[in-house]
Image (cartoon, rainbow, N blue to C red):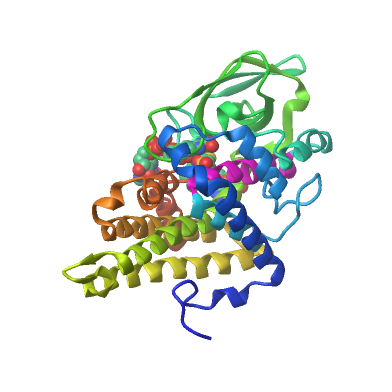
Amino acid sequence: MPFTAQDPLSLDDSLDTAERTIRDNVAAFCRNEIAPHITQWFEHGNPPVPELATQLGELGVFGMHLDGYGCAGTNAVSYGLACMELEACDSGIRSLVSVQGSLAMYAIWRYGSHTQKQQWLPDMAAGRAIGCFGLTEPDHGSDPSAMTTTATKNGDDWILNGRKTWITNGCAAKIAIVWAATPQGVQGFAVPTDTPGFSTHPITRKMSLRASVTSELVLDNVRLPADAALPDATGLKTALACLNEARYGIIWGSIGAARSSLDTAREYASTRTQFDRPIAGFQLTQNKLVDMTLKVHNGLLLALHLGRLKDNQQLTPHQVSYGKLNNTRDAIDVCRQARTILGANGVSLDYDVIRHANNLESVLTYEGTAEMHTLILGQGLTGHNAFRG
Ligand code: TGC
Ligand code: FAD
């Protein structure tokens, strides 16, 4: 096999035909439907989320790794490949899909009643209903165990009060998965967003993930029937288990953003001439390109390995942290290095690298910050919990 810049480790050979087909279909969708508009959506901070959701639903990527209720039921590797192609276009598009499928749909699919699944999952898989996932609060991000959003019983009903912030898809959502503290512990609820007392506010002035809707959720005496509680979403552990699903998608997605930036930088280096030669001919540029290539393809190898473990039901939360920490950290390094190869053009939205680099600032932080995943792995390695004093 020839050595190629696109696939130096010949990883393509490790994919089966179905996996390659899904990857190529998602890549083609991104090329045709997203790429022509993404820079504008990012620049103006106005992605057309409902229309995008319909298209992504038709593509079949919402909850694609779940079975039944209108979901595609693919394997985990295929889902990862889809995340990679979506994020090669923009992290905001992958976020829309992650939050819909891995957080909101997964919570209902894993912890909901049959009635809740029938009510929500087919519409969510088709993109007719958008979901969000409210865990983070203004004063409680890395430590959700301290959440102050409450759910109290009033007769058979539940009354929810509190605020959630930095919630992806919030203003566009028809259904919000909200985590609240009850006297018995944390509980997950499926909250229709037209319930009186529930409101959303857009978070503007973001310099990252601008092609994604991010919102505050306000719950002001939101009265819900007893069956709004997800029956098996009891305890913080169940919320954290949802995070494993979305973190898994990020392991792949971040490599997509890095790969796209690497491709841009390699192409730019081969055509940009300084001192009478292409800058790709300078040793310092080659050093950067090689370093970036190692990070992208080692990251892809890691994602594929973790994906195969997931498909064998063997993937552990510590391994998810390993992948999320390694690949987001390496991906942001790759995008920053790519930016330097483009010189001044690297800071312009005429190229994708600054958009990817800025997006990855969010990806490094959400779904557990790099520090949190370091501490999770530190605890796994040493047995000592360094989170709490
Ligand atoms: P701790 O005592 O460690 O754990 C409580 C219970 O949960 C279990 N557990 C897990 N179970 C499954 N998966 C995981 N990843 C788990 N992590 C912990 C644990 O075994 C225990 O079980 P049990 O049986 O003993 O009760 O809990 P802690 O309160 O000390 O917290 C641990 C810590 C810090 C790791 C956790 O709070 C954490 O992960 N914090 C980070 C918060 C976070 O990631 N938030 C993300 C919000 S959602 C989001 O960002 C979406 S962005 C998406 C997008 O746009 O793409
Ligand atoms: P903090 O927890 O206040 O942390 C601040 C800094 O302190 C970080 O560097 C952190 O690593 C560090 N730190 C905290 N504790 C420790 C410790 N024990 N030891 C060492 N360092 C520590 N949340 C949702 O629930 N749903 C969503 O859909 C969602 N979407 C998001 C979209 C975007 C664009 C962004 C940026 C965030 C989103 N989030 C979402 C929120 C995200 O999960 C939180 O921002 C993240 O968990 C960190 O919480 P925080 O911002 O409150 O930071």
Q: Is residue 93 magenta?
A: yes
**Residue at screen point 45% across, 70% down:** 298
Q: Position of residue 290 (x, y in %)?
A: 34, 72
**Residue at screen point 79% across, 45% down:** 70
User: Outermost residue, left direction?
Assistant: 275
Q: Is residue 107 left or right of residue 385?
A: right
* Ligand 2 quadrant in view: top left
Q: Is residue 386 visible?
A: no
Q: Which residues are magenta?
A: 90-111
User: Is residue 36 shown above or below 6?
Assistant: above
Q: Is residue 97 visible?
A: yes
Q: Position of residue 201 (x, y in %)?
A: 51, 21
User: Is residue 316 shown above or below 189?
Assistant: below
24 or 379, which lies in front?
A: 24
User: Is residue 73 shown above or below 47?
Assistant: below
**Residue at screen point 67% across, 19% down:** 194
Q: Is residue 32 left or right of residue 361?
A: right
Q: Position of residue 13 (x, y in %)?
A: 61, 77
User: Outermost residue, bottom direction?
Assistant: 1
299 or 286, which lies in front?
A: 286
**Residue at screen point 49% across, 60% down:** 323
Q: Is residue 188 magenta?
A: no
User: Is residue 202 shown above or below 14?
Assistant: above
Q: Position of residue 12 (x, y in %)?
A: 58, 74
61 or 162, which lies in front?
A: 61
Where residue 223 sits, quadrant-wise, is top right
Q: Is residue 191 left or right of residue 225?
A: left
Quadrant containing the C terminus in the rendered view: top left
**Dominant SS type (magenta):** helix
